[in-house]
Image: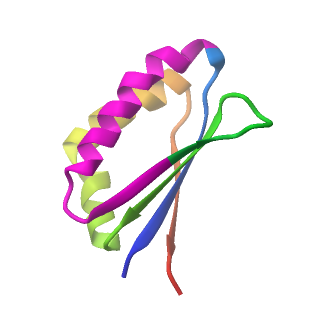
Amino acid sequence: MAVKIIIKRIVPLNKTEALKPLLQKLRNLAMQQPGYISGETFKRIDRPGESLVVSTWQSMENWREWVMSDERRGTQEKIDHLLGEKTDYEVYSYD
């Protein structure tokens, strides 16, 4: 069963440029993973710096394998360090 992953981030304006290559790397790596279907990034209009990422995976297992991969974890740690907080994930399935 496909799952949707929701990732919300608040990025201070002075860290936007430093974050861009890390997020691009993460997206490029994810697109190569088994089970990855799609991803979309949204910027909140009324709150500058707030973004929402929605990715779709074929299964929870595919998502779990990606989350636990050393490739992803290394880049994610750099993102969390830059932002000063851990990234929060919400996982949803279709009814």
**Which of the 4 quarters of the picture holds residue 26?**
top left
Q: Residue at x 61, y 12 (%)?
A: 14
Q: Which residues are magenta?
A: 14-40
Q: Main secondary structure of the magenta part?
A: helix
Q: Residue 5: x, y in percent?
A: 47, 60
Residue 19 belongs to the span the image colors magenta: yes
Q: Residue furthest right?
A: 46
Q: Residue furthest bottom?
A: 95
Q: Residue 90: x, y in percent?
A: 54, 60
Asked if residue 1 is positioned above or below residue 19 in the image, the reply reads: below
Q: How many marks?
A: 0
Which colour scheme appears in the figure? rainbow
Q: Residue at x 48, y 22 (%)?
A: 82
Q: Residue 70: x, y in percent?
A: 21, 42
Instruction: Give whichever of 24, 62 is nearer the camera.
Output: 24
Instruction: Give whichever of 83, 43 is nearer the camera.
Output: 43
Q: Residue at x 51, y 42 (%)?
A: 87
Residue 30 belongs to the span the image colors magenta: yes
Left or right: 91 as drawn, with respect to 2: right
Asked if residue 77 is positioned above or below residue 65 in the image, the reply reads: above
Asked if residue 17 is positioned above or below residue 87 in the image, the reply reads: above
**Which of the 4 quarters of the picture holds residue 71?**
top left
Left or right: 13 as drawn, with respect to 61: right
Q: Residue furthest top?
A: 14
Instruction: Say which quadrant the N terminus sits in.
Output: bottom left
Q: Residue at x 64, y 17 (%)?
A: 13
Q: Residue 81: x, y in percent?
A: 46, 25
